[in-house]
Image: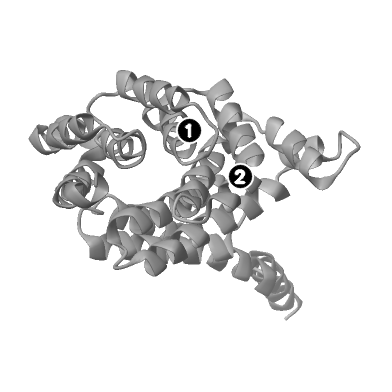
Amino acid sequence: MKAFQYILFVLLLFSGCATKSPISNRYVSKKKNIEHLAKLGKSHWEKRVDHKDAKLSNHFLSKAVELDPKNSDIMALYSRSCYFIGRFSAINDKSADSSFINGFTKSWQYIINSKDFQNGFKSIEGDSLAKTIAGLENLSEHLLPVAYWWAENYTSYLLTKPVLERMENREIIETALHRILSINPEYYYHGANRIFGSFYAKLPGVNLDQSKNNFDKSISSEPAFMTTYIMRAQYLHTKNGDRDSFIEDLQFVLNTDPTKLPEASPENLFEQEKAKTLLAKKESLFE
């Protein structure tokens, strides 16, 4: 009898050790849920040439961000998907703004809560702007994707707003873009230069050569990425009244194989649609 009681005690002891606590089970369940949502988001992202898949990707990634707001990879892809929807899938300007806002607010929250930003922010005395600039100047390489897609969403939103809003935010945007260029100037086909090109074309008092030089640098880095030509036509050529260059850039987009740059084929395909829309408006844009 005693032998049986001893065996029973041992079995109960080991079964107790093997049983996970409710807290542990919740942690494993949450982790698996995050991984599943991120996997779904990435899977639909790869099929973003279909607007439905782009929106599904954004949906699943937003849920993953809610559960894991400190994951930089998920945050960067979520912000990128917001930009994609705002630029290509939105049905009107209000819808586009909503997507851009989602992209830049969540990525900005991630940036300002990061250790890099906080260390820089606290390193100097001064007003909030000076401290914010110090925080951005202290961002490290692992934050580059989040910072880049914050800048894409924020400037895309500001480009259609009153000029005063762009002027008020100029210093912060310039600081972030210069930091990106100092870490990896080639990121997303010299994307920081492309953003500078658009942004400077829409700022009063800025020599348009600054816009042109940034667009040229981005194009020389990757001439098969069509977004740069569209933005140059839309913002620079309309600003300086260069109708011929406007048409030339848009015709180049229409005549270029969008799959020449496989990883950006969806973007290139949608930029061709934008080229058609802009060409149809050329008379009103160059009155």
Residue 31 in view, yes or no: no
Residue 229 in view, yes or no: yes
Characterize the local packing of mark 2: few (<14), some (14-19) or many (20 or more) Cα atoms within 10 angstroms: some
Characterize the local packing of mark 1: few (<14), some (14-19) or many (20 or more) Cα atoms within 10 angstroms: many
* Position of residue 70 measured from the top left corner of the image (x, y, whole percent): 62, 52
Closer-to-camera residue (65/130)? 130
* Position of residue 140 measured from the top left corner of the image (x, y, whole percent): 64, 30
| Residue tagged 2 | 167
| Residue tagged 1 | 196
Residue that lies at the very extreme toward the front in this rendered image: 287
> Which quadrant holds residue 44?
bottom left
* Position of residue 128 measured from the top left corner of the image (x, y, whole percent): 81, 46
Mark 2 vs mark 1, CA separation in Å: 13 Å
Closer mark to the observer between disc 2 and disc 1: 2
Residue 113 is left or right of residue 155, and the answer is right
Q: Amino acid at mark 1?
A: Phe
Instruction: Say which element carries label 2.
Output: helix
Closer-to-camera residue (197/208)? 208
Query: From what the image shows, is residue 192 above or below residue 77?
Result: above
Whether the residues at callouts 2 and 1 have beta carbons within 8 Å, the answer is: no
Q: Quadrant of the N terminus?
A: bottom right
Residue that appears at 60% across and 57% down: 69
Q: Tell me the colour scheme of the image.
A: one colour
Residue that appears at 70% across and 45% down: 114
Residue that appears at 24% across and 61% down: 51
Closer-to-camera residue (256/5)? 256
Q: Amino acid at mark 2?
A: Met
Closer-to-camera residue (56/26)? 56
